Image (cartoon, rainbow, N blue to C red):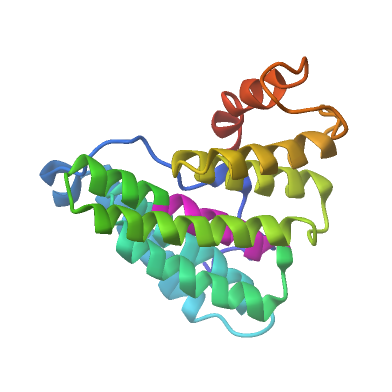
Amino acid sequence: MPPTAHPAPSAQAGLRLPQRCADSDALAGGPARDALALALQQLTLAEAMTGACQPAGLCQALTGVARALCNLHAYGPAESYLARALRWAVVMGSTDTCGDLHCALAEVATNAAELAEQQDKLPAAVYHWQDRARDHAFEAASLAGQTTDPHWEVKLLLRASDVLDRCGDHDDAVYFQQRALVLMGLHNPDLPTDASSPGAAAPTAWRSTAPSQLM
């Protein structure tokens, strides 16, 4: 049965994973490998679809394969599948889906950077992935204001903020976080944001809870 078309992958199904190194057991088999096989089957069905539902079906199926690859810590291939999904999202003309996929690409790149760092790879490899993560995070944030749902805009901004924080870009992370808090009515943009300000603690407190809510 063809996969059900969906207008946008859920932000709740973000691709950030536990920060640990891949091991031979995870890559050799088990539930993660079975999930990848199932996702690939769903992609085959989506590729056989015709008509107006095909772009949405392909976008969802490609994202599913990417998520399964992430569970195997295969971040390079996951990035490739997400890039294909993004091309279909552009065909669909869905800003919401494009923003979500840019967030997913940013999260995958950040995971890859952290994995490279854990495996003592050359700093250039870490910087390469971090740069890719930043590019996608900023693109997601730029699309956030064009989304059709203000709640979706908040989610994109918080996901972009989390990625930038993980990459060490704390000032930009706080800026996007404050944009989200303003939309939620939890932050006064006219207040100073230095550490001595009474309102300065709000963004930090929110950062500690936002990732677990969105991922």
Q: How many marks?
A: 0
Q: Is residue 204 above or below residue 11?
A: above
Q: Name the residue rendered at 40%, 54% in the picture.
A: 130
**Residue 89 vs residue 204, the one in the foreground:** 204
The picture places residue 59, in percent across and down from the top left corner, at: 56, 69
The picture places residue 51, in percent across and down from the top left corner, at: 66, 85
Is 171 on the left-hand or right-hand side of 163? right
Q: Name the residue rendered at 27%, 50% in the picture.
A: 72
Q: Which residues are magenta?
A: 96-109
The picture places residue 177, in percent across and down from the top left corner, at: 68, 38
Occupied quadrant, residue 92: bottom right
Q: Is residue 215 above or below residue 131?
A: above
Q: Taking the image as drawn, is residue 215 in sight? A: no
**Residue 161 vs residue 14, the one in the foreground:** 161
> Which of the image's four quarters has the C terminus?
top right
**Residue 101 vs residue 49, the one in the foreground:** 101
Q: Taking the image as drawn, is residue 2 in sight? A: yes
Q: Is residue 79 above or below residue 204?
A: below
Occupied quadrant, residue 158: top right
Instruction: Tell me which secondary structure the magenta stretch mostly adopts.
Output: helix
Q: Name the residue rendered at 32%, 52% in the picture.
A: 112
Q: Name the residue rendered at 11%, 45% in the picture.
A: 24
178 is within the stretch colored magenta: no
Q: Is residue 37 above or below residue 58?
A: above
Is 162 on the left-hand or right-hand side of 122? right
105 is within the stretch colored magenta: yes
Is 84 on the left-hand or right-hand side of 127? right
**Residue 78 vs residue 192, the one in the foreground:** 192
Is 76 on the left-hand or right-hand side of 202? left
The picture places residue 122, in percent across and down from the top left corner, at: 19, 54
